[in-house]
Image (cartoon, rainbow, N blue to C red):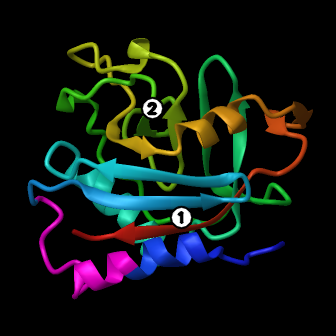
Amino acid sequence: MNRRITAARKAIVHSAVLVAGLALATPLSAQEPVQAVIETNLGDIRLELYADKAPASVENFVRYAEEGFYDDTIFHRVISHFMIQGGGFTVDMQKKPTHEPIQNESPNGLSNRRGTIAMARLPQPHTATSQFFINVQNNMNLDYQGGNQWGYAVFGRVVEGMDVVDDIRFVQTTTRPPFSDVPVEPVIIETVTILEN
């Protein structure tokens, strides 16, 4: 796969390194959102991550990103009227081994609105590992409903690149048993870069 990073992408990364000075010099619970860039073969998606509201989810996402786990994974589930999901499978649909699941932080007051990023999980509430999804419409039915009605934990939002998200949401999909809603042409996450404040 072509992993050539454009001059613009390099500029973003280099400027972030200059500003950051030392990686993770401030704790993830600091007030300023953590910045991240998901570089895909269809363009870049820039995020701000809310460690004050979802510390475990943000720390988890940062850990996978800094380990290079997301490199050459794909958006493997794309539903145009719902969300785009990625961060767990290789181009040939092999599931990558992950760290232990994290605690569900859906009662944090953040809502699954268009442009937010949330942790994907199994039906059981505390099963999120590496996979995440970006809401392409308001999906408040995924929010925490109180009591044992766990939702899907939002931990950030897209601040640049929703046009890229919308390009991804409308790609042609197919079924690759046992998976459905798989892009016909792979939508590749080339890398995820954390841009510390």
Q: Residues within 10 Å of mark 1 (few under 14, many from 20)?
A: few
What x and y, as percent, mark residue 94? Answer: 78, 60
Nearest to the observer: residue 138 or residue 176: 138
Quadrant housing residue 157: top left
Note whether residue 127 is visible.
no
Find disc 1 in the rendering and name its residue.
98
Task: Tell me: residue 143, above or below residue 26.
Answer: above
Q: CA distance from mark 1 to mark 2?
A: 25 Å
State left or right for residue 165 relative to residue 102. right
Callout 1 amino acid: Thr
What x and y, as percent, mark residue 130? Answer: 50, 56
Task: Tell me: residue 126, above or below residue 145.
Answer: below
Residue that appears at 84% across and 72% down: 1
Which stretch is magenta? 15-29
Note whether residue 157 is visible.
yes
What x and y, as percent, mark residue 9? Answer: 55, 71
In the rendering, which numbered label is found on residue 115? 2
Q: Main secondary structure of the magenta part?
A: loop
Task: Tell me: residue 185, above or below residue 12.
Answer: above
Task: Tell me: residue 174, above or below residue 18.
Answer: above
Quadrant housing residue 174: top right
Residue that appears at 28% across and 31% down: 106
Residue that appears at 42% across and 19% down: 142
Q: What SS does tag 2 mark?
A: loop
Q: What SS does tag 1 mark?
A: loop
Disc nearer the start of the sequence (1/2): 1
Nearest to the observer: residue 175 or residue 100: 175
State left or right for residue 127 relative to residue 43. left
Tell me the mark number nearer the camera, choosing from 1 and 2: 2
Examine the structure image and report whether residue 189 is included in the region drawn in magenta: no
Callout 2 amino acid: Gly
Nearest to the observer: residue 79 or residue 123: 79
